Amino acid sequence: MKLLSKIGTVVKMLNTNETNNNDASSVTQGALAGGASGGLKECASCGKRITERFLLKALDLFWHEDCLKCGCCDCRLGEVGSTLYQKANLILCKRDYLRLFGTTGYCAACTKVIPAFEMVMRAKNNVYHLECFACQQCNHRFCVGDRFYLCDNKILCEYDYEERQVFANIAYNPSSLAHLRRQVTLQVLWIRE
C-alpha cells in the first residue's frame, strides 16, 4: 500500500531544518518517469544507472534507495526521515549527527551530561534527564498530568511545594510565628500535666 501512494508523483516527504545550520539537507523521494525526470539518472554512491521505479534526491544528487545510507550506522536515510546531515565528508542520519556534533547540556538535577540525542524534560530554562525529572525533596516520580513546581531552581511535587509555602509564610510573618510558639508552649504544658 505504501508503494501505491508514491507512484507517478514526486513526494517531498519533509523539508525542515531543525538545527538551522548549513549541515542539514532534505531527502526528496519520487517516482522515476522518463519524461519528468529527464531520463535515467546515475547514483551518486555506486555510480550505476538508476533503473528502479523510485529514486532519492539529496544534496542535489540522485541515489538508489539502498545506496543513500548514514556513514555511521548504515541506516537507509530514505526510511528514517527526510533530513540528513553532511559534515566532514560524511552523510549522517539525525541521531548520529547529534551524537557526533550536537551540543550537549547538563541535567539541572544530577549535573551529569545530557547527550544531544537523548529525550529530556524541561522546566523553564532547566533541562533534565527523564529519570531525573522527579521531586527533589521526596524523589516522587511524576506521571502525566501531575502538577509540579519550580522553586529556587528545584522541582517540587505539589505536596512539598505547599509545605514549603506554609513554612515560608510562618517564617516571614511574626504574628504567625508568635502564634505557633504559643501553641507549642501550650502543648508542652499540656503534656507535662
Image: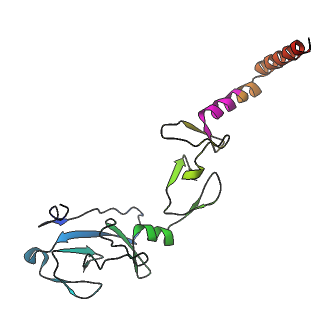
Q: Is residue 192 above or below residue 31?
A: above
Image position, residue 114 (x, y; %): 57, 60
Q: Residue at x 52, y 50 (%)?
A: 121
Q: Is residue 30 found left or right of 133 in the rendered image? A: left
Q: Which residues are magenta?
A: 156-166
Question: Nearest the camera: 105 or 75?
Answer: 75
Q: Is residue 52 visible?
A: yes
Image position, residue 54 (x, y; %): 18, 73
The quadrant of the picture occupied by the N terminus is bottom left
**Can you tell which quarter of the image residue 185 is in?**
top right
Magenta highlight on residue 63:
no
Q: Is residue 169 above or below residue 70?
A: above
Colour mapping used in the image: rainbow
Q: Is residue 127 visible?
A: no
Q: Is residue 162 found left or right of 177 in the rendered image? A: left
Q: Residue at x 28, y 87 (%)?
A: 46
Question: Nearest the camera: 22 or 160?
Answer: 160
